[in-house]
Image (spheres, helix red, strand yellow):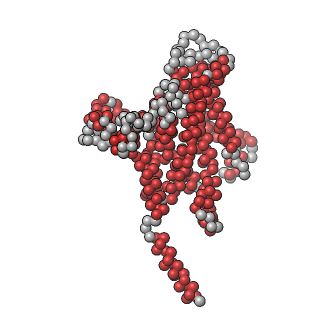
Amino acid sequence: MSVAAESIRSDQAVATYPRRKQGLRLSTVALHAVLIFFCLVIILPLLWVVLMSVKPVTDAYSGKLLPSQLDLTHYGYALQRLPYIWRNFG
Amino acid sequence: MASTAIRSGVTYKSSRLYWLRDSINWLYVLPALFFFCLYMLYPIIEVIVISFTDYKFLSDKPMQFVGLTNFINALQDPLVHLGLWRALYFTLIFLPGVIFIPLFVAILVDRVSNPTLASLYRVILLIPAVIPGPMIFVLWRWMYDFEVGPINTVLVNYLHLFTYRNAPQWLGNSPLTIPAIAFVEWWWGLGYHTMFFLAGLAAIPRELFEAARVDGANEWQMFWNVTLPRLRPIFVILVVLRFGTAMAVIDEYIIMGGFNRALPTYTWTVYMWHLAFNIGDWFQGYAAAIGWIGAAAMLIVVGFLFYVFRDRD
C-alpha cells in the first residue's frame, strides 16, 4: 500500500515538477511582449529627440528618421550660445 | 493627542502637560502651515477679493467694488460655457486612460518574476515622469507636426498608409486634437500612476490569493474579487486627483494650441489666463470670477465623486 502510494507520488513529481521548471511558457512570453511594447512607446519619442540632436538640419526638415551623417554641431552651438548652461547642472 | 500620549506609554497627570504637548505639535506643523498660508491661502483670498472688483492690472484707475457683476457676466459668457464643456470633453477622454492603462501595466509588472527585469521595466516607464511638463509638450508638438513630425513621417514615408494629401492632422482645428493631447498625458503619467497601483498591489496580502486559489478561483475571479476591491482606495484618490488636474489643464493647451478661440484647446483655463495676462487692460477681476466659477463647477463634481465612491461597508 505504502509502496503504491509512494510510486504514485513520485509519478506525479515526475509529471509536474519538470513542466513547471521548463523555460518559457506562452503566458510569460506574452507578458514580456506587452511590457516591451509599452517600454518602446515610452522610449521611441525620447530616442527620436536624441537622434534629432545629432542630425544635420536638412535631415531634420526632410522628415528622415535616421541621421544621414553624425552631426554634433548643434551641441557646440548650444554650449557656445548658452555659456550659463552648466549652471543648470550645478 | 490623548491617543498619541497613550501609545507612547506616557501618561500625563495635569492638563498643563497636555497643553505643552499640543503646542509642540503645532510647532512641528508651523513651517508647512507658513508655506500653505503664503502660497495657497493668501492667493485664494486675494482672488476672492479681486473677483468682486473691476480690477484691471494695466489700468491706472483705482479698482471699484462691483459686487456680483463679474459673476453674472461670466455665467452669461458663451466662451466660459464652451470652455467648461471643452475641458470636460478632454477630462472624459483622459480619465479612463490614465486610470486603466497604468492598472493594466501594473498588473503585468507585478507578475514579472525576474527582479532585474522588473526594476528595468519600472525605470523605463518612469523616465517621462522626471521630465518637466513644458518640455514634454514641446516634444510632442514636434512629434505631431504635420510635415516633419516622426508620426506622420512613419505613416507616409515608411508605412505608406497615407500620403501628405490625406495624412492625419494631429493638432490644430481637428477632431484628433483632444485625443492626441490626452495621449501625451497618458504617456507622461504612465509610469507615475503605475507606481501607485504597484504599491497598492504590493500591499495585498499574498494569503488572500492563496486562499482564493485553494477555494478554486481562477485568475479572472481573483482579479475581480480580491485585487480590485483592495485597490479601491487608490482608484478613488486617482480619479478625484486626476479629475481636478484634467479640468484645470492649461500649459499643454497654450503650448499646443496657443490662444486661438476656434480651437478645441481654448478651454476656460486658457480663456481665464488670456483675459488676465494678455487681452486689453488685463481684466483680472473678470478672470478671477471665471476662475471661481470653474473651481466651483469642479468642486461640485468632486463632491459627487466622493459621494459615488463613499465607503458602503
B271 or B232, nearer to the observer:
B271
The location of residue B285, given as percent across then percent down, is 60, 19
Does A67 appear above or below A14? above
What residue is drawn where x is 65% and y is 15%?
B65
| Quarter of the C terminus of chain A within the rendering | top left
Q: How many marks?
A: 0
| Quarter of the N terminus of chain A within the rendering | bottom right
B72 or B29, nearer to the observer:
B72
User: Residue lying furthest right in this view?
Assistant: B14
What residue is drawn where x is 68% and y is 51%?
B7
The location of residue B193, given as percent across then percent down, is 53, 46
Q: Is residue B142 left or right of residue B282?
A: left
The location of residue A52, given as percent across then percent down, is 33, 39
Does B93 appear above or below B226? above
What residue is drawn where x is 43% and y is 58%?
B116
Residue B158 in sight from this viewpoint: yes
The location of residue B249, given as percent across then percent down, is 54, 33
Residue B207 in sight from this viewpoint: no
Does B263 appear above or below A48? above
Quadrant in the picture for residue A5: bottom right
What residue is drawn where x is 71% and y is 39%?
B19
Quadrant in the picture for residue B148: top left
Q: Is residue B196 left or right of residue A76?
A: right
User: Residue lying furthest top in this view?
Assistant: B61
